[in-house]
Amino acid sequence: MQATSPTVPAGFVSELFAGVGYLGRGFGMWVTSPRLMLLGAIPALIVGTIYLAAIIFLVVNLDPVATWMTPFANDWDETARTVIRVAATLAIVVVAVLLAAYTFAAVTLVVGDPFYERIWRAVETRLGDAPADLNLGVWRSMLKAIGDGIRLLIPAIGVGILVFFCGLIPLVGTPIALTLGAVFGGWLLVVELTGFAFDARGFSVKNRRRALKVRRARSLGFGMATYLLFLVPVAAVVVMPSAVAGAAMLSRDTLAASGDTAARPAK
């Protein structure tokens, strides 16, 4: 009898790739609904330009920031001080990438809320059995998106702190931090991007997370693929509307798999 690995569930890798497939299907919307997707790219372009300027500013000031964050190394010998500050510099870059990728999605969703709601609605209508319109109005929708974003930002800050301290470990710290950043960043993104579908069905953020865990590997595959593509500033403009479309498809399949599609009051 052939033994199976106790650490890797059967089909885990295939589920990851299945999650990536939702993003690919989201890109397909550029072919079927190019005008709608172009509208979704406009907020991403505006926010992306601001983020690019912020990233350039950070890169220019990496050395003084790393020195400020490692005051404990001021009295170390030169070799040890250099090693820890190089590690700190790399850790700062990884954390900045994590927070930039997540907050880019959150901020862009707020700025372009009407456009992205239209993309989500187009996917729901095409697939059938779409939920009723949210009917919150522009300002209430923006306030709700901001509130959800703040609630989701708290774990992002915690993850950022964890990733930073992991990055301080010499030699192995940077690969560990990059891996943790991609996994946790991907999860945060998928929770954020599926907001339209779950909100329309009356799910709170807590219940949204619980539903996504039913297909954790598939959700992670989608989120990590989106996260990695967000690292390319120009690509992020095209990826953002595609990610919203793909998240709508993932949400429907996740809800169908969990058998929990009924609307409920948000708690």
Image (spheres, helix red, strand yellow):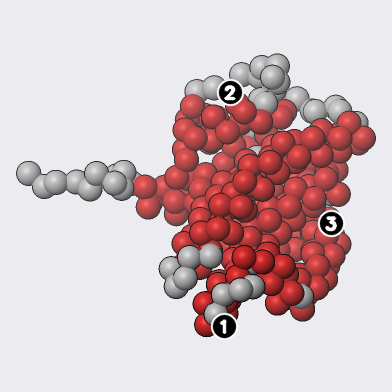
Q: Earlier in the sequence, mark 3 or mark 2?
A: 3
Three-letter residue code for mark 1: Glu
What is the secondary structure assignment of the residue under circle 3? Answer: helix
**Given the current orientation, which residue lies at the most extreme bottom position?**
78
Q: Nearer the viewer, mark 3 or mark 1?
A: 1
Q: Relative to residue 42, is residue 215 drawn left or right?
A: left
**Residue closer to the observer: 150 or 227:** 150
Across and down, in percent, residue 101 comes to 68, 58
Q: Nearer the viewer, mark 1 or mark 2?
A: 1
Q: Which residue is mark 1?
A: 78
Q: Which residue is mark 2?
A: 261
Q: Which residue is mark 3?
A: 43
In whole angstroms, how far apart are the C-alphas of marks 1 and 2? 60 Å
Above or below residue 178? Residue 29 is: above
Q: Residue at x 92, y 35 (%)?
A: 139
**Residue closer to the observer: 63 or 123:** 63
Residue 174's disc is: none
Three-letter residue code for mark 2: Thr
